[in-house]
Amino acid sequence: MGKLKDKSLKDILSRSMAEKILAVETIWDSIAEESDKIPVSEAQLTLIKERLEEYKRNPSSVKTWEEVKKNFLKRK
């Protein structure tokens, strides 16, 4: 991390772990509330559409999060 110029950020970083987590949760919630304002590029939209069409053609080809996680943890 580069130099911290913002006094508010320095203040947050000097807090306890619990207070830092609460701050991050608050920030994340504010981002989630504005998620519809996050720009999506044409390339991203194209990829989403391609993946949706692929799923519609072969819905059994997808894996659940639990399957992915299980396979990932096996490799460790």
Image (tube, rainbow, N blue to C red):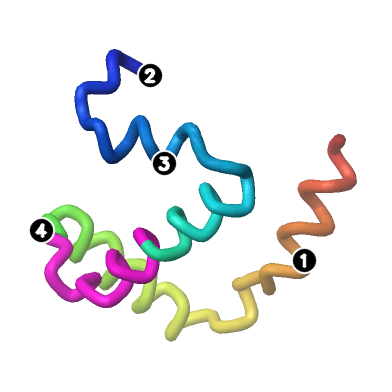
Which numbered tag is attached to residue 1?
Answer: 2
Residue at 38% x, 37% y: name it.
Answer: 11
Coordinates of residue 53 in the picture (x, y in percent): 35, 78
The kind of residue on which mark 4 rests is Glu
Report x, y in % for residue 14: 49, 33
Which residue is depicted at the point 21% across and 31% down? 6
Q: Main secondary structure of the magenta part?
A: helix
Number of the front mark, 3 or 4: 3
How far apart marks 2 and 4 lie (CA) works out to: 31 Å
Q: Which residue is mark 3?
A: 12
Q: Which residue is mark 4?
A: 42
Secondary structure of the residue carrying numbered label 4: helix
**Mark 3 Cα-neighbour bin, 10 Å: few <14, some 14–19, many ≥20:** some
Left or right of 25: which side holds 71?
A: right
Q: Residue at x 10, y 58 (%)?
A: 42
Q: Quadrant of residue 37?
A: bottom left
Write down the residue under mark 1.
67
- Using the numbered discs, state the Cα–Cα distance from disc 3 to disc 4 in whole angstroms: 37 Å
Q: Residue 73: say if magenta.
A: no
User: Looking at the picture, which amino acid does disc 2 mark?
Assistant: Met
Label 1 vs 2, first from the N-terminus: 2
Give the magenta range.
27-39
- Give the number of callouts: 4
Label 1–label 2 contact, CB within 8 A? no
Name above or below for residue 73 compared with residue 40: above
Establish if 41 lies above or below 9.
below
The N terminus, quarter of image: top left
Q: Amino acid at mark 3?
A: Ile
Q: Is residue 25 left or right of residue 35?
A: right
